[in-house]
Amino acid sequence: MKLEEQVRFVRGIGPKKAELLQKLGIVTLEDAIQCYPRGYEDRTHIVPIAHLADGEKQCIHAVVGAQPKTAHIRKGMDVTRCTVYDTSGSIPLRFFNNRYAAAALEVGKEYAFYGKVQAEGRAFVMLAPEFEPVGADNKTGRIVPIYPLTAGLHQKDLYRVTEAALQAVPADYPDFLPEKIRKPQGLPPLAEALAHIHRPQNMEQAQQARHRMVFEELFLLSCGMRLLRSRRAGQSGVQLRDLSLHAFYRALPFSLTAAQQRAIEACTMDIAAGKPLSRLIQGDVGSGKTMVAAALCYLAARNGRQAVIMAPTELLAQQHIQTMQPLFEKLGISCGLLTGSMGARQKRETLQAMESGEIAIVIATHAVLSDNVSFHDLAVAVVDEQHRFGVSQRASLTAKGENVHLLVMSATPIPRTLALLIYGDLDVSIIDELPPGRQKIKTYAVGEKTRPRIDRFIDNQCAEGGQVYVVCPLVEDSELTDTARNSAESTAERLSRILPHRTVGLVHGRTKAAERERIMADFAAGNIDILVSTTVIEVGVNVPNATLMVVENGDCFGLSQLHQLRGRVGRGKRQSFCIFYGADKGEEARERLRTLVQTSDGFAIAQKDLEMRGAGDFFGTRQHGLPPMKMADLAGDTRLLEQAQQAANVLLADDPDCSNAPLLRAKVQKLFDQCGDGGLN
Ligand code: ADP
Ligand code: MG
């Protein structure tokens, strides 16, 4: 067979199995060969019966001692027993509903058995072993690949199709990894790696093959991101001739930090150089990223062009417009808001004003991405809290104009290697300085027995004129298994009861947008003392008068998320506090929370979070815009990731659009197609 042929033509695979295989993404033999084992069973070690270990699958060579006996246990269940021995001892075998075993095993003959060994009383028994005559070496004596399955498929099906696929690999199968990348890394060529990953002769081969596949994956990804970047770099950006920011600086109520100024300068230098700006602003919560965005928007408006800031939630869009509108009004620049929940008439008016250019600066949610939204002359696009948006959404925002300058702001510090990947198409500025006068937030991890004291502390903060956030993981008691009383609703109810002289507000995911907005506005205006909420307030919300953040069930959140939450306080001049419940939930919970007590460096926390939970959980359900990883573990394979990135840089430095390696280019394209990105074209 040929690699392009469909697996349904493989012997033993019919249309039914083919359909199941399709669920695993396997249609052709070529697909099959890219379905790698998720693990291996090493059946090469023959264990003397006397040395068998409890609970593991092991291989023995043993002689059948007596005729196997089958007993009918109950309806539909026959058990066949048979004792086998080697020079070290003997062990009973047990088969279930296996007539074949009962008939095939011959007394006095030696077989290789492979099965799970289990203790029963003082003795061991081997359960449902696979077997074959010694020397056959089909099921034993080798390393057996274990494939991912779906209901209705068996290992032997996957074995069949991968076997057919391996046979179909031609001797001159081309390797899309150029030799000059592969050689220095000591990676096996593709055909060899494929043979070894599917049918390793020893575990070292399997390991080497996996190493190549992981490298390959990370390398493709790195190349893709670099191609995205160099493609933009080859274009010219919108010309903004007047880059003077004096008036903007004068209109600000404070002077910018050195880090903010550096970030703004880096942007204006890119623009002055005629490049399209593609820059990520990474900075800890509260570092003042918004002002960098505002400066860029101002420049667009000053040059008679338009700018847009896209925020991930309505709440944030609202907050941005509240801070920007007064600022830009002073400068004689018109601002508008565009969100999904706007009334039809208002929306129509806004859309018209955007199209005519009447509105210079638009603050929006992703509603701005829809097809019916267009700008008169978009020059600057800002994406706030970007990793909630995908790579493709970035692209569709900049597509609203020509050669638009792009600024991305990430509120979640992420470890460097990951940042290089996810934002590999961007230049990076880091804001590593907080506005002056901020005090360190005093952080405590506490358990239940401290609750009465914390309740009094909440009251005290209010008495001193501060405000309090209380964050709970879930909406209703019914969603919690153990500590039901900590849910948002019951917490709000409890606090109003024990602190009747304080106003308590409640916001959760099911609160209607308008209602939520009203409550948030009330809290911002100081009419609510204590705001109880689920994580809807997580990102970006800014109430400088809030001095205390209490998080219930702190052990249920990721570290980065907790750090984000903590960033909601400490935005004013007063000493702020953060209290995490959950320190009494075991050693792991305590260690996690301790990290937060000890450090306020968002990058260090992110690194710790990544190490403790792995990349999948790190991002949670959030979209990070990357193609799915098959082999690589973004948290664990960081060294390899760095090597892959370096290799990609070297290769593309000589050949920026990868035209000398068309196979590689096609492969990268395919990877990015998978994430629905259309990314490279
Ligand atoms: P983030 O980086 O988390 O988006 P923001 O841009 O929301 O932070 O800024 C947090 C707060 O700090 C806002 O109230 C903002 O007005 C204020 N701020 C920003 N820059 C400065 C500065 N240079 N001096 C004083 N306050 C500042
Ligand atoms: Mg922000």
Image (cartoon, rainbow, N blue to C red):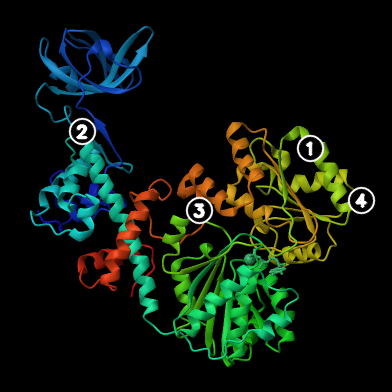
Kindly state the secondary structure of the residue where label 2 is placed: strand
| Amino acid type, mark 3 | Phe
Residue 523 vs 47, above or below: the answer is below
Q: CA distance from mark 4 to mark 2?
A: 71 Å
Q: SS class of the residue under badge 4?
A: loop
Between label 4 and label 3, give the one nearer the viewer. Answer: 3
Distance from Cα at disc 4 to Cα at disc 1: 19 Å
Look at mark 3 in the image and give the residue it sits on. 619
The residue at the point 88 percent across, 46 percent down is: 499
Kind of residue sitting beneath label 4? His
Q: Position of residue 19 (x, y in %)?
A: 27, 51
Mark 4 / mark 1, whichever is N-terminal? 1
Q: Earlier in the sequence, mark 4 or mark 2?
A: 2
Do we see residue 673 in this rendering? no
Displayed-image quarter of ligand 1: bottom right
Upstream in sequence: badge 2 or badge 1: 2
Where residue 451 is drawn, which disc sits there? 1
Which residue lies at the image location 48% right of the left edge and 87% below the top edge?
238
Q: Residue at x 31, y 51 (%)?
A: 23
Residue topped by disc 2: 143
Compute the Cα span from label 4 to label 3. Answer: 40 Å
Task: Say whether disc 4 or disc 3 marks the residue closer to the N-terminus.
Answer: 4
Q: Position of residue 679 (x, y in %)?
A: 37, 70
Mark 4, residue position: 501
Mark positioned earlier in the residue sequence (3 or 2): 2
Q: Nearer the viewer, residue 555 or 10?
A: 555
Residue 105 falls in which quadrant of the image? top left
Where is residue 25? Give x, y as percent: 29, 54
Q: Quadrant of residue 147?
A: top left
Q: Nearer the viewer, residue 439 or 67?
A: 439
The residue depicted at 65 percent of the width and 41 percent of the height is 480
Precedes in sequence: disc 1 or disc 3? 1
